[in-house]
Amino acid sequence: MQRTSFSGMACSIARTLDVIGEPWSPLILRDVWVGMNRFEQLQADLGISRKVLTERLNHLVEQGVLERRPYDRRPRYEYVLTRKGAELVDLLMVMKGWGDRWLAGEAGPPVLYRHHACGEIADVELRCDHCGEPMRADDVDLLPGPGVAGTAT
Amino acid sequence: MQRTSFSGMACSIARTLDVIGEPWSPLILRDVWVGMNRFEQLQADLGISRKVLTERLNHLVEQGVLERRPYDRRPRYEYVLTRKGAELVDLLMVMKGWGDRWLAGEAGPPVLYRHHACGEIADVELRCDHCGEPMRADDVDLLPGPGVAGTAT
DNA sequence: AGGGTTAAGTTCCTTAAGGGAACCCCGAGT
DNA sequence: ACTCGGGGTTCCCTTAAGGAACTTAACCCT
């Protein structure tokens, strides 16, 4: 299949996809986030092929999104989110919101978030980190940034 | 390769991945968002195989994320975001932010957003739609929602 | 009327990636 | 010594992505 790598593109979306764009990767992150940290747990929960799970975990560790660390004197390892990985969970939360709104149907959302700050059931919303007003697809203009011609490190 | 479908899972993240989780789909959305609406433009810009582009566009149209409409009396069509699709751009904006922070390197971001409301260069930030405070990976508890046992419509 | 042009696909072949089951390794416990 | 269990690796099969060539349907020009 020789999938094209996106990392050469001067686009942060494409680069992000090179880290978590492969099939299963976001679901692996989701599971690790909610406390499923071991190979066997992930494999059983997702029903993913062990081969592919190994590949994905290795890739996520290489990318610095997960950390693999021993939890026993036997050769046992668990995977935990790094700071880089925890920030990726933002993406999952937005995906959850969109899926709830457009795909959940009559049954409603399978999962709810309770926000620590206010204690309420809530969802995320995108706001401008400068003025705090909502910031969505139609609320921005795109300008070339310093990294336009970037030769994609 | 017979990729496993995620749509049976009672998880809005998995369901969202069934809509835009295939390779290229997010980049197609990005391009359509910034005004590349035609088959030839997309193919040339992305360097994607025409066969795969056809498959992806059909899938995105079936999912109600894009609309295919004629723009000429000849058989010419362009693809535009539906409301459902425009809300998916939220996801792209978050991906862009993460990529800028973690993958852009010395060169800096290839693209900048200027927020209409304040006129400043800015990025998105996740906030609680109930209390307005920041809402990130560690700021929430997960609870079962009404759709838990949902037989995935 | 005939020939060329262009957007938007379609077809066909090759190669590589996912699925799935079986197998392996290593340290502990009994 | 022998079994157990987590965490992988190996193998084969099927299917999806890459890529180039081919098709179709209107329009345009002479």
Image (spheres, coloured by chain):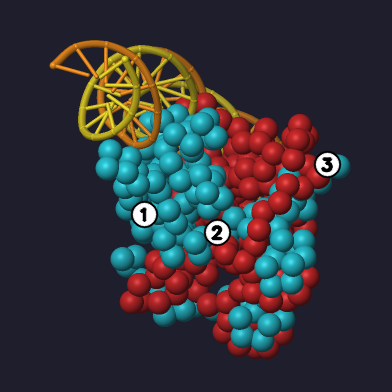
Chain colours: A red, B cyan, C orange, D yellow
Mark 1: amino acid? Glu
Mark 3: amino acid? Ala
Q: CA distance from mark 3 to mark 1?
A: 36 Å
Q: Tell me the crowding category of disc 2: few under 14, some 14 to 19, or many 20 or more residues within 10 angstroms, Cα based.
A: some
> Mark 3 — residue?
B107
Residue B149 tag number: none
Q: Is residue B99 left or right of residue B130?
A: right
Q: CA distance from mark 2 to mark 3?
A: 25 Å
Question: What's the residue at 40%, 77% (across, down)?
Answer: A108
> Mark 1 — residue?
B67
Mark 3 — on which chain does it sit?
A: B
Residue toward you, B31 or C14 = B31
Mark 2: amino acid? Val
Which of the two discs, 2 and 3, labels the residue nearer the N terminus? 2
Quadrant where the C terminus of chain B is found in the figure: bottom left
Which of the two discs, 2 and 1, labels the residue nearer the N terminus? 1
Give the SS element for disc 2. helix
> Mark 2 — residue?
B89
Give the SS element for disc 3. loop
Q: Is residue C24 above or below residue B135?
A: above
Mark 2 — on which chain does it sit?
A: B
Q: CA distance from mark 2 to mark 1?
A: 15 Å
Question: What's the residue at 45%, 29% (across, down)?
Answer: B49
Residue toward you, B54 or A115 = B54
Quadrant where the N terminus of chain B is found in the figure: top left
- Dot 2 and dot 3 residues touching (CB under 8 Å): no
Q: Tell me the crowding category of disc 1: few under 14, some 14 to 19, or many 20 or more residues within 10 angstroms, Cα based.
A: some
Mark 1 — on which chain does it sit?
A: B
Q: Residue B12: image x %, image y %?
A: 47, 65
Which of the two discs, 3 and 1, labels the residue nearer the N terminus? 1
Question: What's the residue at 36%, 39% (across, down)?
Answer: B55
